[in-house]
Amino acid sequence: INFLDYFQEKHGHRLVPSSPVRPRGDPSLLFVNAGMNQFKPVFLGTADPRSEMASYRRVVNSQKCVRAGGKHNDLEDVGRDLYHHTFFEMLGNWSFGDYFKEEACCMAWSLLTEHYGIPADRLYVSYFGGDAAAGLPPDDETRHIWVPPGRLLAFGLKENFWEMGDSGPCGPCTEIHYDHVGGRDAASLVNADSPDVVEIWNLVFMQYNREGDQSLRLLPRSSVDTGMGLERLVSVLQGKRSNYDTDLFTPLLHAIHQVSKAGPYGGRTGAADRDNVDMAYRVVADHVRTLSVFILQSAGRTSVLQAPQGALASLVPTVTHILITDVINENEAHFLSSLQQGSRLILRTLNRKDYKHGDFPAAVAWSLHRDLGFPLDLVDLMLEERGVQVDRPELDRLIAQNQKVKSDPQPGFQSALTLDVLSLAELQRLGVPHTDDSLKYQYRLEQGRYVFPACSATVVALYDGQALVSEVSEGQRCDVILDQTCFYSEQGGQSHDLGYFTRDALQDVLFPVEAVVLAGGYVLHQVTATDSLKTGDQVHLHLDQVHRLSCMVNHTATHLLNFALRKVVGPSVQQRGSHVSADRLRFDFSVKSSLSVSQLQQVDSCVSDIISANQIIHSEEVPLQTARSIRGLRTVDEVYPDPVRVVSVAVAVSDLLDDQTNRQTSVELCCGTHVLQTGDIEDLLIVSERQMVKGISRILAVTGRDAALAREQGQVLAQDVDSLTARISGSAPSSLDSAQRLAKEVGVLSDVGTLPMMHCSHCHLIFILFCTFIENVGNRNIYS
């Protein structure tokens, strides 16, 4: 019996598919690195109550994970040992307020020893032994569940207490370890980095919540989160001491041998692995698996084509030849170019007269990593070959400084107050109904002007950042929960609404709304109280209509841009992220390389035609499963509510559902707010397009008056470029002064970062202009 069948058929778990390795709307993660990532909204209590996820109780899945950066990073261990990988599959079972410790432990032990037939005398179990300094007692409940006691080992916080982050759900864990050798007492090798005694399954019991002040409070509902690496399990079941000796890797290692000039893979590590050949085998095998998973993630959308089961697998040889080989070859060429450039810089640094032997300059190593994408562990290896090491304390300081710059809020920024899992549970216990925010969609056009509905509401709850309170005083920051609202909460890539509300008895005192957030069905209006406010107060909401309308314009423009890109570039374009604010829109999408000026102009023309046609925007809520049957539907990898909102341009949603049209149009699942006709966008201008990483481009665009202003600035710049080009092309500068003046003018025109210009085509002109200037100056040393 396999893992998934065991939990589905014998223990009534729901099978949930693996989420893509790109995280769903979680900026804290570079990659999905654990099975629990997609279930964070359930653990935190923030899942949309209308979504399928909100109904999860017992769940099982096999999650594709990547650990190649961030908090969980196995990149530097890959190849050095026999059991770490950047890509792996994590088998897991979860309970969300259903079963707890005893049932979880018994199911795990039964699967391993009875169904898989793993000898019990090869298994060791660790549990949390408590921590007096943290005020945490030993997990005696788990200790009493496990037998035999002779193989039960207590460990501390580091090994056996799991935390989601600096705050949030956490709890003790119990781990099952396997001894590959057997016939001995290997207790001392547990958690000792022994290649022969490895952890295979971790069972986490989430029973606490870590507060912002680092204190712990018991959760109202305990949960179970388990994870077992497929690769490690397979090595146990196949009797191999190394994951790389299983049939998950041996065909790949054999293929690497066929295309290399090295001897066959020998499985050696450490000093026995002369010239690190076997380590290189493991690194290449691991990394090519990771690359392939990333590339193939976007290919699993065969349902739209109504293709039969197995269709995707039948395409793999063709895809491998056309797509994967091509992409990997490009990335390999790019990396080799960086490698050559970085190697030259390393050698140049080592050969400098002022180089002090011993510590390699950390600034150079960090520059290689930051600017060329040069792996730091590769820098270490290259220096190690020359008997040199990087200045580690200084490098650590630079890395920490970079992280601080990324994580520190901007000046004047105040972090949002978000309901914690305990307060969300308290709201549900008190029977506080979810916020009715349907008014956010109930606007209309009257004589060419948008009319937004008036909204009065009752304060049903207040949250002060620590707990629910009945009243807040002047100057206190808090979240205000109302029975209904017309404000849009930040979601779906669209910025939250702005505005204010007034209290019934205090109409002249305004409570400005700083942020609007959705959590577990409750809309939180973040305010700094300008007077006292208490539950039961009646308030009147006043929406910043200019801000809302600008967001509506930019959100609809984003849909048109998505449609135009697919029409011009092709169906391979997939949305990879977006953000809509009042002043601009950002759209990230998959594409092999940066778009040409011609392609961008075609996209611009396509969007302009739809705007000029003043087409009607249709929207309707329909059952999620019904919506997925719509031909040409665009979706992103998100957890959608059920029913879900469908937004279509020019074609009524009812016609799309009845399949009565073959017309190609923009149709997406979207919770955002949109204009009611495309003509209200007036104009859209792409101000920049660049590749963020290989294969992912980002477009920034503006609309309406901002677009018109940007076009004017672009035309002025083009005239300046033409004028300067004519002067430079005529003849070489007659004097040093004139050359310096021309250089200054080129420099001014080159500073285009602050000017929004169409497609940045003038950036190319300025670059040519600069090259022409240098060519005309020739060998004259004008900077002496």
Image (spheres, rainbow, N blue to C red):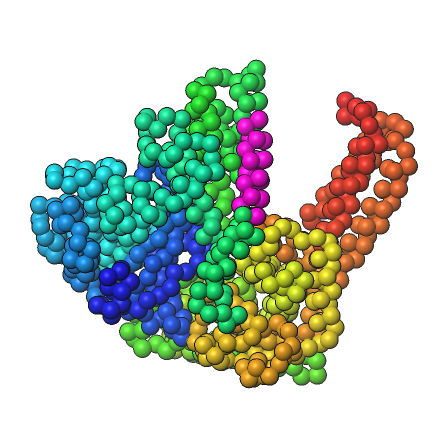
Residue 714 sits in quarter: bottom right
Q: Which of 132 and 563 is in front in this view?
A: 563
**Does residue 195 belong to the magenta stretch?**
no
Task: Give the dominant element type of the magenta stretch: helix, strand or loop.
Answer: helix
Q: Nearer the viewer, residue 473 or 46?
A: 46
Image coordinates of residue 271 in percent, x first then y, are 32, 26
> Residue at point 81% right, 32% down?
775
Residue 15, compared with residue 348, is above or below; it is: below
Residue 527 placement, left or right of 183: right
Residue 1 placement, left or right of 321: left
Query: Is residue 425 something one can see in this rendering?
Result: no
The range drawn in magenta is: 326-344
Image coordinates of residue 494 in percent, x first then y, are 55, 65
> Residue at point 83% right, 29% down?
777
Quadrant location of the N terminus in the rendered image: bottom left
Image coordinates of residue 385 in percent, x first then y, are 44, 23
Query: Is residue 260 something one can see in this rendering?
Result: yes
**Does residue 339 belong to the magenta stretch?**
yes
Q: Nearer the viewer, residue 619 or 315?
A: 315
Residue 198, compared with residue 493, is above or below; it is: above
